[in-house]
Image (cartoon, coloured by chain):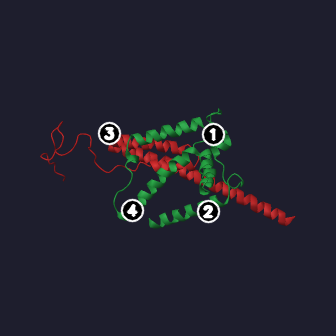
Amino acid sequence: MEDQKPNEQTPFGQQPFGQTPFGNNPGPAPKNWLVESILVTLFCCLPFGIAGIVNAANVNSKYAMGDYAGAQAASAAAGKWTKIGFFVGIGVYVLYILFFVVLGMGGAMMSNYR
Amino acid sequence: MKFKYILGFAFVVMLSVVYYEFNPEMYNFFPECPFHKFLHLDCPGCGSQRAIHSLLHGNIIQALNYNLLLVISLPFLLLHLLLKIFSYLCSEDYNLKIWHKPITPKIIFVVVVIFWISRNIPKEPFIYLAA
């Protein structure tokens, strides 16, 4: 059983010793996907990267305010949008190349069949 | 984990060779942006392929003409990549701290949206931004 240690808990309204009031960070900053969403915005030609940038803004401001759970949720959302943009971009690219290859093969066969 | 990075590096080198050899303006096997194809408007990434081709040939002015935002942001992204590799090799954290400042994504968002809107305005000072 987890026993409570009231001596180690600081009283309400009092900052624990050695910690600044606003630097109450329970963990490292979650990944904010900012660079990845910039890359998606620039190279995948799709507006999904913008959603990633907005969520990255949420991650940073929530983490700065000390809302660690909110920052993690925003990090998950940013990752989701960035991945959607990335894979849709890759998908469009691959489909286009496939389309081109199929057309090219068709053209080559037709010219042989003539 | 390491294999992924080697694969990515090989992929980037391969793409660079393709974009160096073939001009996306001339050859039609480069995919066109769906946003531009269906809406006939430029998105923030339109012109990136031509800009990369121009950059690989050292033609910075033409690259700026194709996509201003890409050429401006590439130094930051390259610096980020180099610092990341450096801190991986030295196992110390040299990464840029600006990515975690709350104001940075907001500035980037505003810049991207202003760029997106202004490059679609068919008036004299803005048509240079269009892809």
* Chain ID for green: B
Work out which residue is located at the far right of the displayed protein and give it: A114
Q: Which of A88 and B127 is in front in this view?
A: B127
Q: Which callout, 4 or 3, points to the residue nearer the camera?
A: 4
**Marks 1 and 3: CB-CB under 8 Å?**
no
What whole-number distance in Å separates the C-alpha atoms at marks 3 and 2? 46 Å
| Amino acid type for the residue under numbered disc 1 | Tyr
User: Where does label 3 land, which residue?
Assistant: A65
On the same chain: label 1 and label 4? yes
**Marks 4 and 3: CB-CB under 8 Å?**
no
Q: Give me the disc on residue B17.
A: 2
What whole-number distance in Å separates the C-alpha atoms at marks 1 and 3? 41 Å
Q: Which callout, 1 or 4, points to the residue nearer the camera?
A: 1
Secondary structure of residue under mark 2:
helix
Q: Give me the disc on residue A19.
A: none
Q: Which callout, 3 or 2, points to the residue nearer the camera?
A: 2
| Amino acid type for the residue under numbered disc 2 | Val
Q: Which callout, 2 or 1, points to the residue nearer the camera?
A: 1
Q: Which callout, 1 or 3, points to the residue nearer the camera?
A: 1
